[in-house]
Structures are given as C-alpha cells and as structure tokens.
Image: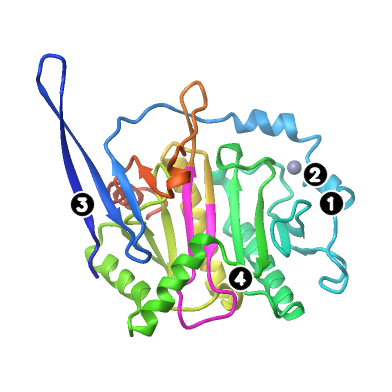
Amino acid sequence: MELKRYKEEITLYDTEGNPKSSWVEIRVDPLTGEVSRVINVPLREWSLPDLEAMARETRASCPFCPEHLENKTPKFAEALLPGGTLGRGGATLIPNLFPYDRYCALIILSKAHYVPLDAWKAREILDGLRLAQDFINRVSAYDTSVNAFALNWNYAPHSGSSILHPHIQLSVGAFASNRGRRMMTAAYDAMLEGKEPMTELLREERSRGERWCGRIGPWNLLFAFAPRGRFFEFILMHEATGCFPLLPEPDLKALSEGIVRGLRFVVTMGLSSMNLSLFSPLREEGIFHPMVSISPRACVGPHQMSDISFQMLIDEFFALFLPEEVASRFRKSREGA
Ligand SMILES: [Zn+2]
C-alpha cells in the first residue's frame, strides 16, 4: 500500500534578505483519502488546567457522583432496559439528559469524581466497554431499524467535556458519524473491488515499523500516518474484521489494556486531556476492522487559545508532531514496553 506524503520546502527572507527555510508535509489518509498536514511550527507552552482544583470545586454539585446519580439522573423506558439503567463493577450506564440521537446513553466510568488520566485501571475501562456492548445489543434487539452506534469520550474541559466526572458518550440510531461513515464506506467500496485496505494498511505499517508499536492481543498499536488533532493520533486497530458489539471478552480486555496505555502516554507527552472515539459497524462483521482513536487536546498560552482553529470548518488537521517521532517516544516509554 502506498502512503502518500508531499513535502513542500518554503523559503522566506528576513529584513536583511537572509533566507529562512521552512516546510510543511501534506499527508493523505490511506483509508479515506483525507488530508492532514504536519507543520513546522515552534512548540508553544500549552496551558494545562488544574484538574485537582477543578475536582475540589465541582465535587459537591456533581450529578454523576454516587450520592446524586440515583436521584438526579433520568432512566430509560422499562421496555428497553428493565430498571432503567445498567451497572457493572464501578461503571453505570444512564440516559443522556441531552440526547443527540435516538438512543443516547452516558457511561459513568467510575464512582470517583476525578481519575487522573494516568491512573486508569484496565478493569475500569473494561467495565465501561462491556456496558457499552450490552446497551448496543439490547437497543439493536429492541429497535431493529437502528443502523449505527457511536462511542466517544471527552476527558476534561479542554477536550470539550462539561463535567469532570469521567463519562463516555454512547449513542445508537439511524445515522453513523461522518468520519465513521467515510471510513466504513471506503472499506466497503474497496471490498467491491476485491481489496482489503485495512488489512493492507496493517501489513504495510508492520513492515515499515515507523509508526507501528506492537500488539496487545488482537489489537495493533500504531500512530496515524495522517493524524487528526494538534498533537498525535494513537490508534488501536483490530487485526481482523469484525464489529464491536460482537467482540468476545478477551478482545475487550486487551482493548482496555491498550486504551490504558494510550491514556498514560498522553500524560507522558505532557498533556492531560484527550478525545477518544471507537469506530465499528453495528452489525456487519466482514468489512471493517474495529478501531479506537485517541487524540490529546490542550489550550495554548495564557489566553487559553483553542488547539482547533478554522480546521474545524475545512475538516483538516495541522499536527505539530511527526507521527514517526511520537511512535519512537512511545516505544521507549513504559507504555510501549
Ligand atoms: Zn462526580
């Protein structure tokens, strides 16, 4: 598989007429054809929020802390979910009070109000993933007209989370997310031509070894060639095609371990917020390799400049780190060991 990248060398001149060289690398996502740019911009101090202080300030009024969860949150219809909620270990699934899809749930991942990003246990993530799987399968059986699900996690305010208490957003409905649909459509279209682009990508990344960082169980750990986000995109891609709702327990357990490594690495890289998304078909098992993507988020400087600019309107990302260098740091870190 060809990984397309185009490096543009740029020369500018200072006031004395001396040349100053710069560059930008334009990279094409091998699955969707979408472009990301790796840019040569000096790193500025990003401003990390004081999450410990935020935890102290928000603890008393938190709707997801155990003493409030029971009496401040709504319940699903009995016909869909007897009892209205689901629980497993320290995780609880409740309806999202502000739905954005036909079936919209929140998975409160922990009874603790604040869990630092590098303090997660795989067991806690696994409980959340199993609840997600359980809910998706119940909804699919209850309403056979749903076609897609989305599992997303905003961790801490710089990632877009309004409540610090850790919670995953899960939705099931008629429409897939834009990116999910683009990736799955690309895989489907390729299949009609007898190609398997995700299998090819894994083979290519493994043989190059530049961004590939090994495997946990069936999950390949790699950094995206054309990353989404300001810093890097850490990916866990299943070795085989399948769909998340039907993955067996050992696969979920390995995925939880991989996610924990990704979260710790965000902290190793000096960041403390992130977005996580899981991509998978709802039912189809033969087309797409289930994958999880983690991208750190941060504001910059004293004025809390956002790390996303007009990039949101043009649907294109400018990354500050070379994915190959980030992968090298991962392999040398305890998370990559
Ligand atoms: Zn709380």
Determine the secondary structure under disc 2: loop
Determine the secondary structure under disc 1: loop
Question: In this picture, which residue range is highlighted in magenta?
Answer: 276-296
Label 4 neighbourhood size at 10 Å, few (<14), some (14-19), many (20+)?
many
Compare marks 4 and 2 and give the one earlier in the sequence. Answer: 2
Residue 258: percent from left, percent from top: 48, 60
Q: Is residue 282 magenta?
A: yes
Q: Quadrant of ligand 1?
A: top right
The alpha-carbon separation of the residues under discs 2 and 3 comes to: 49 Å
Q: Amino acid at mark 1?
A: Thr
Determine the secondary structure under disc 4: strand
Identify which residue is drawn at 77% across, 78% down: 142
Residue 5: percent from left, percent from top: 23, 55
Identify which residue is drawn at 71% across, 69% down: 135
Q: Is residue 280 magenta?
A: yes
The alpha-carbon separation of the residues under discs 1 and 2 comes to: 7 Å
The alpha-carbon separation of the residues under discs 1 and 4 comes to: 25 Å
Q: Kindly tell me whether mark 2's CB lies below 8 Å from ligand 1.
A: yes
Q: Is residue 259 above or below residue 251?
A: above
- Mark 2 highlights which residue? 63
Q: Quadrant of the N terminus?
A: bottom left
Compare marks 2 and 3 and give the one earlier in the sequence. Answer: 3
Q: Is residue 313 above or below residue 3?
A: above
Which of the labelled discs sits on residue 6, or is there none? 3
Left or right of 35? Residue 14 is: left
Left or right of 237? Residue 10 is: left
- Mark 1 highlights which residue? 73
Badges 3 and 4: C-beta atoms under 8 Å apart?
no
- Mark 4 highlights which residue? 148
The residue nearer to you, when weighing 44 against 147, is 147
